[in-house]
Image: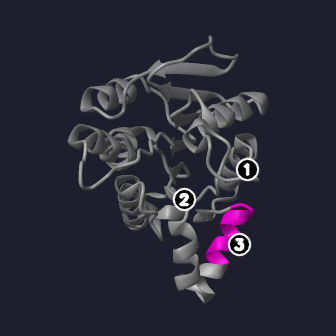
Amino acid sequence: MNPILVTGASRGIGAALTALCAARGRPVIAVARHFAARPAPGVTQITADLAGRDGIARAAAAVTMPLHALVNNAGIQQALDLADPDPAAAEREIALNLVAPLHLTCALLPQLPRGATVVNVTSLLARHPKPSAPVYCASKAGLASLTRSMRHQLGPRGITVIEALPPLVDTQMTAGRGAAKMPPETMARAILDGIERGRPRIAPGPSRAVLALDRLLPELVARLMARG
């Protein structure tokens, strides 16, 4: 059974997806900057910082077998005041949220056979940004566009490319924001089930509702998202 490679696997959605794969008997390659615990049976850990080309090369070089799926989940969201920006922080955000999925997917193409899947975890904020996180929103919008381009290019190779759109999920990234957050385990199940179904978009629960409303009342959705 070919493994699933999950980035950002040490916490949040990535950690939940790694645990779910292991529980279902699916081998998983977990990639993260740091791991706090030893891997569960069936899990291979790769320590790499994907915000840099060296980390991407290290992760790709460690994968020597065909993959069932690549899940580009790693990401960061930072507040940024455009009147007093932090260029290094902004560049790291773009590198991890947008550049890493591009370069890692390209580097792993030899390990993505016909029938494999690439999942890019984007955001509803890619469609309607919020003022406090302009670089996050822009980088996720870029990843959404990249996902569509990947689908055009990789489809003829027999590789399915999926965009995953989480709602507000209960992770460290969303600490102190919002209510009624989706548990990361629920989003992990949606991603794993989506990989098996091969549909172009994974948008569970609230995400599906937001996308439906956006088709009817995009200005209202934009105002609501801007308050996030």
- Few, some or many residues within 10 Å of mark 1 (<14, 14–19, 20+): some
Residue under the point 42% across and 56% down? 132
Could you tell which of marks 3 and 1 lies nearer the N-terminus? Answer: 1
Asked if residue 79 is positioned above or below residue 82 in the image, the reply reads above
Task: Please say whether residue 209 is one of the residues in the magenta stretch.
Answer: yes
Could you tell me the amino acid type at mark 3?
Answer: Ala
The residues bearing labels 3 and 1 have C-alpha atoms spaced at a distance of: 14 Å
Residue 97, image x and y in percent?
A: 39, 47
Query: Is 93 in front, or is 119?
Result: 93
Residue under the point 62% across and 74% down? 211
Q: Which residue is mark 3?
A: 209
Q: Which residue is mark 1?
A: 182
Region of the chain picked out in magenta, as a range:
204-212
Asked if residue 19 is positioned above or below residue 204 in the image, the reply reads above
Q: How is the image coloured?
A: one colour
- Few, some or many residues within 10 Å of mark 2 (<14, 14–19, 20+): many
| Mark in the foreground, 3 or 2 | 3
Asked if residue 136 is positioned above or below residue 16 in the image, the reply reads below
Tell me which corner region of the image, top left, top right, bottom left or bottom right, holds residue 154: bottom left
